[in-house]
Image: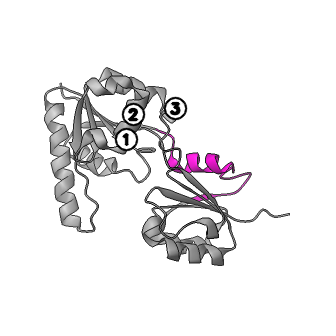
Amino acid sequence: MRGIVYGVGVGPGDPELMTLKAARLIRENNVIAVPGENAAESVACRIAGAAVPELKDKELVGVLMPMSRDRKALEAAHRRGAAMLEAYLERGENVVFLTLGDPTVYSTFSYLQHILEEDGYQVELISGVPSFCAAAARLNHPLAEWDEPIHILPAAHRAEEMAGLPGTCVLMKSASRMAEVKALLRRSGRNVGAVENCTMEGEKIYRGVEEIPDNAGYFTLIVAQEPKKG
């Protein structure tokens, strides 16, 4: 029988925010895959290792997931990564692929999932604490109340859309154009908070647009809320 691939969210960074199910799957399976060539140095692996000491005894597989705008190069890399996992599946071994946050939200694993499913393999997603929920908790602000909607935007591509949206806007992937995003936030009149490296070492909390540095790191998430009425 072929093995199963589990796309497992390890949460935003704090090992205590990993789910019991994520920990169990790591303990019960021998092959643990993570994004990045050096598996042991990946952020996801360090988080999981702090929560599940047994990880050090597992077979770690690093899957290179390059940051590139070249679609052909990305497709080739994703297919190579999927082929690596399929080799284990054909031997009847399950693969636990660790991903930051939740595997359904801007996860690198989703690219592999599409290929694996097209090739006829079984994939199961295991939810983790999403980064935007963890960031809202660190800011000590509810993301939404009563009838307020929430919008999740990849700020590197679609931050401008915030202007026409009610409720709360969560801006992910902001770092590459932070100065532009901050200009949009100033014009929006929204109440702004941000968290860099949420629940990780080096975490920084910013309250207000002006506190956010233009060179904020890759793991910076912004919560922009409409002022409360009344």
Outermost residue, right side: 230
Under mark 3, the amino acid is Glu
Q: Secondary structure at mark 3?
A: helix
> Which residue is found at the position 43% from the left and 28% from the top?
51
Q: Residue at x 22, y 47 (%)?
A: 37
Q: Quadrant of the C terminus?
A: bottom right
Q: Position of residue 84 (x, y in %)?
A: 16, 41
Where does the magenta region start and end? 128-151
Q: Position of residue 175 (x, y in %)?
A: 45, 65
Judge whether residue 134 can be spotted in this image: yes
Disc 2, SS: helix
Q: Which residue is located at x 26 percent, y 48 percent?
A: 36
Q: Label 1, on which residue?
A: 44
Left or right: residue 159 versus residue 83 is right
Where is residue 190? Give x, y as percent: 68, 68
Please say if the residues under marks 2 and 1 sit with CB atoms less than 8 Å apart: yes
Please name the residue shown 43% across and 38% down the image: 10
Identify the residue under disc 2.
48
Q: Residues within 10 Å of mark 3 (few under 14, many from 20)?
A: some
Which label is found at residue 122?
none
Answer few, some or many: residues within 10 Å of disc 2's Cα (few below 14, many 20 plus, some between 14 and 19): many
- Amino acid identity at mark 1: Ala
The picture places residue 127, in percent across and down from the top left corner, at 45, 38
